[in-house]
Image (cartoon, helix red, strand yellow):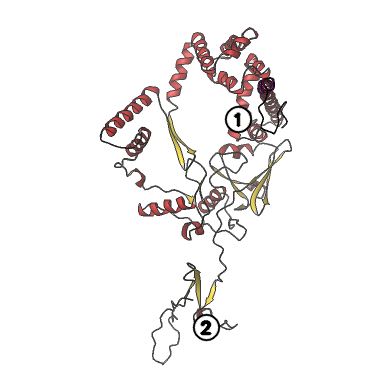
Amino acid sequence: MILPGASNSGSPASKEVQAQWVDLLSELEAVKNAVTATQARLAVALDVATRAGEAEQSIRAERRGRGVPNQVGAALRCSPHAGAGFLSTARVWVTGMPHTFNALRTGVLSQWRATLLVWETSHLSAEHRAQIDEEICGPANLAALARTGTRRLAARVKELAAQLDVHACVKRNAKAASQRCVSVRPAPDLMVYLTALVPMQQGIQAYAQLKKHVEATKATGDERGTGQIMADTLIERITGREPSRADEVPVTINLLVSDQTLLAGGDQPGVMVEGSPAGVGAVPATVARELAAHAIDADAAWLRSIYVDPHGRLLATTSASRFHPHGLAALLRAREQGICGTSWCDAPVRHIDHVIPHAQGGRTSLDNGQGLCARCNHAKQAPGWEQQTTEVEGRHAVETTTPTGHTHVAVAPPPPEPVRSETPPWTPAVGMGRPSARASRSRYSIGCRTTPAHGTIAYRPHRNRGPGRRTSRRPQRQHRADLTWV
């Protein structure tokens, strides 16, 4: 990009040029907010038009507009869940808070602050929400709004809401207590955020107890940091384990890893797949081997073998049943690596779906199957949605066509590559020449690759004689397995 007064020589710019850059930053921020307002208006118009068209098709009211959040999310390059959130917020801006929408359109209000106004008034009636909208973002208050910080803005909205309808605020607080939960989400460097949403008094009490334990532990000479002691204590008390043994809880971690990484010292990373609420995540090869070894020591390791063809595709399997059986469903989840197959959707796989519906002749097979979240599975059932399978660079892909004619292609992530050895599956045993056309299979041994210093192990099994076969009158010899190094 060419900036006014900029140069590539690295020389300092004048005060006038720097002032132009600051003005340009401010103007671009206003343009960005205006673009957000335009996107909101377009999303609401698309939703209204889609619902009107589906009403003419006599579709039930609760099913109208199901596919709009997916279309909005795909257009904004975000997940369907984020698209649904933007659509619901935009609907409030356009229909219920016109002054907030105008402040966003003119660049006075940012998208985050405009969204905050919607959240803080969600428990109020339409009349009270309109009053707060005019009080905060009315034409006479735009200058004061531009100077107000975000925290003070939220506090002012809460104050006005309590004055207009205190009963609604009390009900909102009571409802918030019923939404307490515990969640986990991925963090950088193979860490996770374990979050608990609890009432304020319970959260403060738990934090105070952890702080008190830190002071007692520090007094004994523990060199760990305050945060480390609090985190270790929390996990130890939740898992019921003794100190420094919290990681020995016998749970299964579903790790998709190649045989080369797990057994042959390869450097290709593994992937966390289904069963992990934290979602997908790459695991370095060394860490994957350590996880498997530690899990074996703790009697908690489960290894799942998934075979691929030379192109890296999972081997296909079919089923004559209407629904995907457990084994096929697990294979589909592994192919998607636990994440919904829709583009830009980061939700975990909840539904195993037919790409071409079963009612239209779609097969219950690996190629015609896909792992989706609940929202994406319901959205594709709306009128006008079509899907078909394809391939991109040899990997399974699904091409989705929306009711507006736009096409989106979702490609399955590449699986870990297996060992590609040049050793033939059958190797002549020691002392044998090239096999003849009439040589029996029992005269050749199964070869497996080991370390380069050893080469290939050749094994020749005993000649087992089954019942009813003729035995030789010659003296029996002791046949030993040939374990000579080739």
Q: Quadrant of the N terminus?
A: top right
Q: Is residue 22 magenta?
A: yes
Q: Nearer the viewer, residue 241 or 87?
A: 241
Position of residue 227 in the picture relative to residue 96 (left or right): left
Q: Is 468 rendered above or below residue 153?
A: below
Q: Give the total of numbered labels.
A: 2
For mark 1, what is the residue?
84
Q: Which residue is mark 2?
A: 432
Q: Label 2 sits on what residue type?
A: Met
- Residue 39 lies left or right of residue 201; in this view the side is right
Disc number placed over residue 400 in the picture, else none: none
Whether residue 265 is in magenta: the answer is no
Question: What residue do we see at 59% from left, 31% from top?
Answer: 82
Q: Nearer the viewer, mark 1 or mark 2?
A: 2
What residue do we see at 45% from left, 23% from top?
176
The part of the chain drawn in magenta is 12-25
Label 1 SS: helix
Q: Can you tell which quarter of the image residue 195 is in? A: top left
* Whole-percent x, y for residue 26 in the image: 66, 20
> Looking at the image, which residue is at 66% across and 18% down?
107
Residue 276 in the image: above or below residue 258: above
CA distance for labels 1 and 2: 70 Å
Instruction: Spot the residue most to the top.
Output: 140
**As drawn, 458 above or below 74:** below
Which residue is located at x 36 percent, y 54 percent? 297
Q: In the image, residue 223 lies at what x, y percent?
A: 32, 37
Helix, strand or loop for the magenta stretch, by majority = helix
**Residue 168 percent coordinates (x, y):** 49, 15
Picture coordinates of residue 303 (x, y %)?
45, 55
SS at mark 2 in the image:
loop
**Going from the N terminus, do you reach mark 1 or mark 2 first?**
1
